[in-house]
Image (cartoon, grey):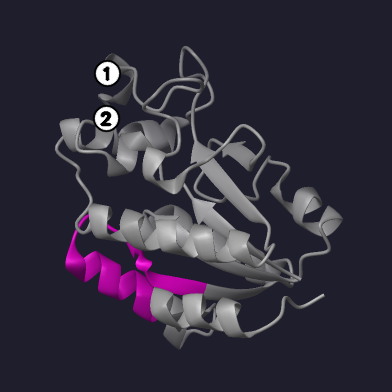
Amino acid sequence: MKALVVIDMQNGFCHPDGSLPELGMPLSGAQEAVGNTAIAVASARDRGMPVVFTRHVYRPGYHDEGPWLAGQTPDLASLGGLLAGSWDGDVVDELGRGAEDLVVDKCRLDAFQWTSLEPLLRGLEVTELVACGVVTNFCVETTVRSAIMRDFEVTLLEDCCAAQTPRLQRIGIEVMRDCGFATVIPIAEFAESVTKTPMAA
């Protein structure tokens, strides 16, 4: 069984009014990646493939942020960015997340660390992940590496991802592809494959 895992496509990262763009850290190609991910989500749903959204969020007071992450965005707390339950911390509207959708909240780069993601996937009998999201060379790459260490096969939708610069995007994709952490394909190939191929049990 496959599942689509959409990593951290939140207003704080991907919306022009989000906290990261406000801090001068916008993602290059974010809107294109969001549009392509909307196609991936619709394609997965059409075939009955589980869709899991992750959200990188913090509790009030940011006590769960940790020193390293706090050092990367030292002014995030002053904006109230990525707070759990806030607009900034929620999935972008373009992906059509509903109240019934599967959502896993996290506070580290690795979506498996200290979360329910792995037991959720095991309960769904998922053995292969189709991954996409932001930031390519941070949370996406870290989660993909972690998935491989947990014996999940990973396919990465390269044009459903975004990083701060085109160079960092290319580097992140190349590392995951060339080191064998993921099979890298474009959204068009994924959408065509789920249309033509029955869901794997």
Q: Quadrant of the C terminus?
A: bottom right
In the picture as drawn, the residue positioned furthest to the left comes out as 24
Query: Where, by quadrant of the figure, is residue 68 drawn?
Result: top left
* Amino acid marked by disc 2: Ser
Give the answer, above or below, for where 63 lies relative to 17: above
Report helix, strand or loop for mark 2: helix
Residue 28: percent from left, percent from top: 19, 57
The residue pinned by badge 1 equals 79
Q: Is residue 158 magenta?
A: yes
Q: Mark 1 packing: few (<14 Cα in 10 Å), some, or many (20+)?
A: some
Residue 36 horizontal/vertical position (percent)? 36, 63
At which x and y percent is residue 143?
55, 59
- Residue 101 in view (yes/no): yes
Residues at circles 1 and 2 in contact by the CB criterion of under 8 Å: yes
Percent position of residue 128, x then y: 69, 72
Magenta residue span: 156-174
Residue at figure coordinates x 62%, y 40% from the top left? 103
In this rendering, is residue 129 above or below 92?
Answer: below
Q: Quadrant of residue 105?
A: top right
Residue that extends furthest to the top in the rendered view of this protein: 61
User: Which residue is disc 2 drawn over?
Assistant: 19
Q: Residue at x 76, y 71 (%)?
A: 1
Q: Amino acid at mark 1?
A: Leu
Residue at the image position 83 percent from the left and 63 percent from the top: 125
In the picture, the disc for residue 181 is none
Magenta-drawn stretch contains 165: yes
**Depth order, front residue of 21/75:** 21
